[in-house]
Every structure is written in structure tokens, then in C-alpha cells.
Amino acid sequence: MVYFRPSRLSGSGLLLLCLILGADQSHALELNLTDSSNATCLYAKWQMNFTVTYETTNKTYKTVNISDLSNVTYEGSTCGDDQNGPRIAVQFGSGFSWIVNFTKHAPDYLIDTISFSYNIHNHTTFPDAEHKGIITIDNRVALNVPLNDIFRCNSLLTIENNNVTQHIWNVLVQAFVQNGTVSTKEYLCDEDKHATTVAPIIHTTVPSPTPTPTPKENPYVGNYSVRDGNSTCLLATMGLQLNITQDKVSSVININPNSTGVTGSCHPQTAQLRLNSSNIKYLDFVFAVKNENRFYLKEVNVSLNLANGSVFSIANNNLSYWDAPLGSSYMCHKEQTVSVSRTFQINTFELRVQPFNVMEGKYSTAQECSLDDDTILIPIIVGAGLSGLIIVIVIAYLIGRRKSYAGYQTL
């Protein structure tokens, strides 16, 4: 493992950085770095989130999801000089930092190391951590990219090291930009070369329809829970069926709750349920609070091994499903579909979830989904019956008028 030591920023360079980060976590970070002549020397655009597992004071382990990249700064980002290569440095939240180091080895440049630091003394994120202080995780990447090519990877890239998982996707980056002009020649990651989610720049033909997977019986319904200390903080009951499309081949996977592991975390504004099994590396459901009085499913991350030996990974943190008031649960007995991406959907059966304000380990009053609400059928049936009755009366009246008119004809 290479341990990265950041060098000082050269004072001769003029930095112009643009970091675009909206209030919504799904917005990408975008960095345009220029040199002393105001020419672009490094460009990057990407999305990322993190999960950290830490030891608590009662000797148990918790996993937290870090996806709110607020209060962003970029101290230490540099074009590089004769002694040091370019560097992306991002600081966010309470004590988090993320650094990418680049080096040049003609005819290529390397995405060399990625470092992630977090302050476990942060009581908001790690309220009951056993150990305190700043922890830095260094990862040697050593990814070669041809000089004057821009690296693109829309697929989910996962880096795991020392209880930290980094999820990075929708990556577009070029270091050592030539003549201040970002290249239009793309160098794709291996995952994108075989992924069906990467669309061509120009469409000249209509894509063929995706084959429909063979129908499968409904999955078993499982009961899942997450504990915070001695109390239950998240409850979920559901049957889960995964619908996956890769390389134009569709498959259906039913999750067996009897062989599925459960972890997660609970916080005032977010909660996470993570499932895993022999073939599912992780399946994350991340819930969030909105408007201080409702919760909803905001994010789903998945990485699993398919039957053909390939790895399928998708992340989407801009969802809006399972909306209900805080202090209640969300319930939907009928089959419901969560569309995570064009290539990944989750069918749920006998669903009930409560990610916040669980009291005594039991569900609170449920808000039912519209699919379960049969009361709307009553006015529809009554209205249809009345409409049919009116039509019959009108037809009978018209027939009677015609017969009456025919009886008065001159003989």
C-alpha cells in the first residue's frame, strides 16, 4: 500500500476552480483548474459517496453512510510542477477530505492514489465511537490513461479498504490537459466498455428491445431490522425481487431472507439498511427526512455477482419512493416497482418499512400506498352504475318516442 503525503501548493500558480454542488446530494462535483496563464490544466466531474464501519464504546460495530457533500472547499488542488504532479483535493462536511494524485509516465498519465480522511471525533456522524482522531485511508489505483485522453467511467467504481467503502461514478477526468483544451477523445474504463448503461454520443439506429426475463415466482417475505445501541431504530418487512439487464440479457433474482445478512445505521436525518448474501456484495436502501415531517427512500446502491461471473453495480441517490409521515410506517401489500436505473429495478411484495422513530421495536400506524387503497373503487363503481342507468333510460325514452310518433301517422 502506498501512503500518500500531500505536498505544498506552489505559489507561482494561479488557481481558478469551479466546484458545482447543488443542495441535492445527486449533483456532481465539477472542477476546472487553470494555470498561471489561465489555461485549463486539469478538469474533473464526478459523483461519490462513502460508507464507514467503526467500533462503538460498547464493542459493537456500526456502519454510516456519508453522501451529503456539504460545506465543500478545495484547498490543496493544484496543476502540479516539476516536482509534484496534479492533485484534486476536496474537503467537505465535518472533517472529511478526499484527495486524488496524478503522475505522468509518457505516453500515459496515471490516476495514481486516492486518499480519504475522516475525523472519528465527529460526534454527529460517529456519536459513540470508541476511538478518536483523524483516520486516513490511502489506496493505490495506478490506472493508466493515454496523454491527451479524457477518462470516462459512468459505471459504479468501488474501493474497499480498512472498513471504508468508496463509491465513485459518472467520472470524467483529464490531468495534464494540453494547450488548455480538454480533450474530446474518451478513454473508457473496462466496466463501461461492457455496460449497457453507457449510451453512444450519436444515435443512428433505433436500439433493439431488451428481452423480457422469464417470470419467476414471488420471493419469500423477510423481516429486517437495524439496532442503535440497545434499541431498534429501523424496521423493514418485504419480499425482494431484483430485475437486472446486462449486455442485453435480463435476469431475475429473488432474495432469500433466510440466507441474507443485515447491517445498517440510523441518524436524525438519514437511515440505511444494507443487505448482503453469498452473491450480493451489498444492497443498500438509504432513507432521508424531507420538510422535517416526512421520510422517503432516497438512495439505492447495489453490487452483486451474476451467474455468468460478471459483477453488476449501480447507484442512484436521487430517488423518491415510499413517502410517509415521520412517526408512521409505509406499507404496500401489492407488488410495487422501484426503478433504480434503466438496467435495474426492484419489485417489492408485502412491503412495510419504518426507518425513523421506531418505538419499542414495533411498527407505528401505516400509511398505505395508492395500490392498496380500494376505497377509490367505490365512487368509480357507483359512478359507472349511474352512468349505465342513465344511458338505459335515454335509450328507452328514444325508442318510446319513435313508437309513439309512428302511431300518429296518416293511414
Image (cartoon, grey):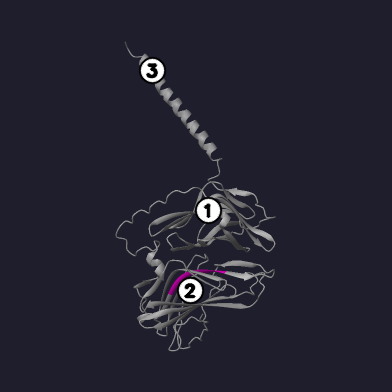
User: Tags 1 and 3 in contact by the CB under 8 Å rule?
Assistant: no
How many numbered discs sit on the rendered protein? 3
Q: Which residues are magenta?
A: 44-51
Query: Vertically, is 168 above or below 250?
Result: below
Instruction: Name the quadrant of the C terminus.
Output: top left
| Helix, strand or loop status at disc 1 | strand
- Per the image, the residue denoted by label 3 is 403
Q: Which residue is mark 1?
A: 240
Q: Earlier in the sequence, mark 2 or mark 1?
A: 2
Mark 2 vs mark 3: which is more N-terminal?
Answer: 2
The kind of residue on which mark 2 rests is Leu
Residue 288 appears in the picture as rendered: no
Label 1: how many Cα within 10 Å (few below 14, some 14–19, many 20+) = many
Between label 2 and label 3, give the one nearer the viewer: 2
The residue pinned by badge 2 equals 19
Residue 47 within the magenta-colored segment of the rendering: yes
Q: Residue at x 42, y 79 (%)?
A: 110
Residue 291 located within the stretch drawn in magenta: no
Mark 1 or 3, closer to the camera: 1
Q: CA distance from mark 2 to mark 3?
A: 82 Å
Residue 149: x %, y % from top left: 36, 76
